[in-house]
Image: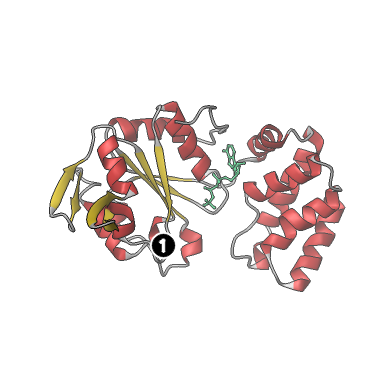
Amino acid sequence: MLENTPYYHAVGKEIEVFNQAYKNKIPFLLKGPTGTGKSRFVEYMAHQLNKNIITISCHEETSSTDLIGRFIIKGAETIWLDGPLTTAVKEGAIIYLDEIAEARPDVIVAIHSLTDHRRELFIDKLGETVKAHDDFMLVASFNPGYQRGFKELKPSTRQRFIAVSFDYPEPKIEIEILINETNIDQDTAKKLVAIGNKIRNLTELGLTETVSTRLLVDAAKIIHSGLPKRLSVHVAIVEPLTDDLQTVEALKDLCNLMI
Ligand SMILES: Nc1ncnc2c1ncn2[C@@H]1O[C@H](COP(=O)(O)OP(=O)(O)OP(=O)(O)O)[C@@H](O)[C@H]1O
């Protein structure tokens, strides 16, 4: 169990919605771009509900075996080892499948019976069905923009969840987040958030992903620990965004005017 409450600043009604999803045993889906506080929110909710959280970062190799479990050889014996999903189902923890659309299709198949009224997990290798603990909750995230349409979640999967969209917070809240996360002064926090919003509005740059709150937090951290402001903005905000040299130079010039 986490000891200190993770810092999370609500941006809408997501806390109330999550609480109701948990109470009503409905899986919860967080949609939104990278670095918008999705993982932090789930950590915060797990802490508020006094629950263990098991996080799986899904990628194209993540299979149902990784989640459900496998036989391993130990000495002369073959023993069964529960995977993280099975452990969460049995113990009543929160399982957080980060970037669920990245996982292999058999993962989606495996969670279907867990995400409807049955709330049970079929362990095919054992021929067993496990009923989920009363407190078990399935939470998943996905990034619709990043998927670029080819790794979409099917309606039959999406419609098993209560879904909330996460986006960049409004400036007032984002400034507060920066100050809380890094102890940066108000004036610099304001300037960083202004830079973030300026670049976010430059849609003509065609960036795959634009400035996340995470990038602004990182810039604030290195400024607070002593790196010059302009250099910090270049390395923490501009460089991670793009490799296109012209765009990098244009963004650096723009930022220099703002900080
Ligand atoms: N609402 C918020 N309250 C507190 N911190 C936030 C909030 N939103 C973003 N942050 C900050 O942004 C950082 C990135 O957030 P987080 O790791 O939760 O992003 P994410 O949406 O899960 O991204 P990814 O999809 O890449 O995993 C956090 O470490 C935190 O510093």
| Total labels drawn | 1
Q: Is mark 1 within 8 Å of ligand 1?
A: no
Residue 223 visible here: yes
Q: What element carries label 1?
A: helix
Which residue is rendered at x = 42% and y = 57% of the image?
Answer: 58
Identify the residue at the far left of this view: 127
Residue 53: image location, x then y, percent = 41, 38
Which colouring convention does the figure follow?
secondary structure
Front-lying residue, 67 or 59: 67
Residue 92: image location, x then y, percent = 29, 35
| Lateral position of residue 216 relative to residue 82, left or right | right
Identify the residue at the far front of this view: 76
Q: In the figure, 156 relative to 172: above or below? A: below
Residue 156 visible here: no
| Lateral position of residue 81 relative to residue 2, left or right | left
Which residue is rendered at x = 75% and y = 50% of the image?
Answer: 195
Question: Dot 1: few (<14), some (14–19), or many (≥20) neighbours within 10 Å?
Answer: many
Kindly identify the amino acid type of the residue bearing the numbered disc 1.
Answer: Glu
Q: In the figure, 211 relative to 2: above or below? A: below
Residue 252: image location, x then y, percent = 81, 60
Where does label 1 land, which residue? 102
Front-lying residue, 119 or 242: 119
Front-lying residue, 116 or 126: 126
Front-lying residue, 118 or 197: 118
Which residue is rendered at x = 79% and y = 33% of the image?
Answer: 185
Picture quarter containing residue 48? top left
| Lateral position of residue 73 relative to residue 233, left or right | left
Rendered-image quadrant of the N terminus: top left
Q: In the figure, 19 relative to 56: above or below? A: above
Residue 49: image location, x then y, percent = 40, 27
Which quadrant does ligand 1 occupy?
top right
